[in-house]
């Protein structure tokens, strides 16, 4: 285990836990995790995951703003963004769109070492599976930014797959982190569902 993996694990776990608690500073701590994870993923050839960190850097900044300064009609009693649910039609569109994007990214990442041999000397590990978790992480992040309950169920699916993938790539601590994320995702789904129901009474 490297120092890089250790601190990526610590910062990532704290950021996710703060998200469950609706703490807006989770997005700022997430910026630290993004930088560390980007370097680590490059080192272990999980290139779609590496690219994903650039997206996460931007969305952490936007997420902080959206949670902290919502429109008046979307604010809770703390004057922060309130928890809501997705419309069923929107959920279907997001899932099918995500699967199409997974296929496209998987095809691209599988050939990265041939297209850009100077940048990527080794072939992508798990191009299709890694692309699935990458694309769906983007979808789940937008859900989280909007404080949608379904974000946590999406994260649960992503975390289960990621736990296996990182274990096989021998970043065992990060694999353990994602196993913990699975538990946190279930807790987050239950907690946010409870808060959503209370707000609609």
Image: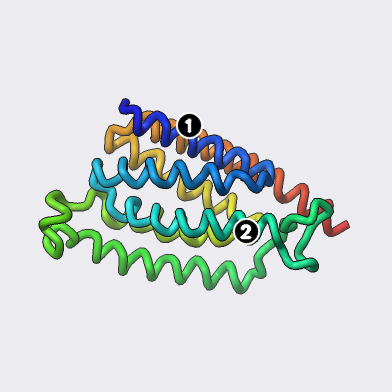
- Residue drawn 66% across the image and 55% down it: 149
Q: Nearer the viewer, residue 68 or 76?
A: 68
Image quarter where the C terminus lies is bottom right
Q: Residue drawn at (57%, 51%), measured in percent from left and top?
A: 153
Say above or below: 73 vs 129: below
Question: Disc 2 vs disc 1: Cβ atoms closer than 8 Å?
Answer: no
Q: Quadrant of residue 44?
A: top left
Is residue 94 rendered to the left or right of residue 132? right
Question: Residue 144's x, y, as percent?
Answer: 59, 56
The local crowd at label 2, few if under 14, some if 14 to 19, many if 20 or more residues have their Cα within 10 Å, is some
Vertical placement of 100 versus 23: above or below? below
Is 82 left, or right, of 158 in this rendering?
right
Q: Position of residue 141 (x, y in %)?
A: 53, 57
Residue situated in front as seen by the camera: 93 or 35: 35
Looking at the image, residue 28 lies above or below residue 175: below
Give residue 10's mark.
1
- Which quadrant of the view contains residue 167? top left
Residue placed at 24% from the left, 65% from the top?
108
The answer to whether any part of residue 200 appears in the image is yes
Q: How many marks?
A: 2
Q: Is residue 194 above or below residue 96?
A: above
Q: Position of residue 8 (x, y in %)?
A: 42, 36
Q: Quadrant of the N terminus?
A: top left
Residue at mark 2: 65
Report whether residue 144 is seen.
no
Residue at position x 53%, y 54% in the image = 60
Displayed quadrant of residue 99 = bottom left
């Amino acid at each position: 285990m490297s120092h890089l993996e250790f601190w990526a694990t610590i910062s990532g776990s704290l950021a996710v836990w703060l998200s469950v608690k609706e703490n807006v500073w989770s997005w700022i701590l997430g910026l630290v995790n993004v930088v560390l994870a980007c370097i680590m993923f490059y080192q272990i050839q999980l290139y779609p995951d590496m690219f994903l960190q650039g997206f996460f850097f931007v969305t952490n900044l936007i997420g902080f703003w959206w949670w902290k300064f919502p429109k008046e009609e979307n604010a809770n009693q703390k004057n922060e963004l309130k928890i809501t649910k997705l419309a069923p039609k929107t959920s279907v569109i997001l899932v099918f769109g995500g699967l199409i994007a997974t296929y496209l990214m998987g095809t691209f990442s599988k050939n990265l070492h041939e297209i850009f041999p100077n940048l990527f000397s080794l072939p992508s590990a798990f191009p299709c599976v890694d692309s699935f978790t990458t694309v769906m992480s983007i979808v789940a992040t937008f859900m989280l930014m909007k404080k949608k309950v379904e974000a946590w169920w999406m994260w649960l699916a992503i975390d289960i797959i990621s736990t296996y993938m990182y274990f096989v790539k021998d970043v065992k601590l990060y694999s353990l982190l994602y196993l913990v994320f699975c538990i946190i995702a279930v807790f987050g789904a239950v907690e946010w569902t409870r808060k959503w129901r209370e707000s609609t009474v």
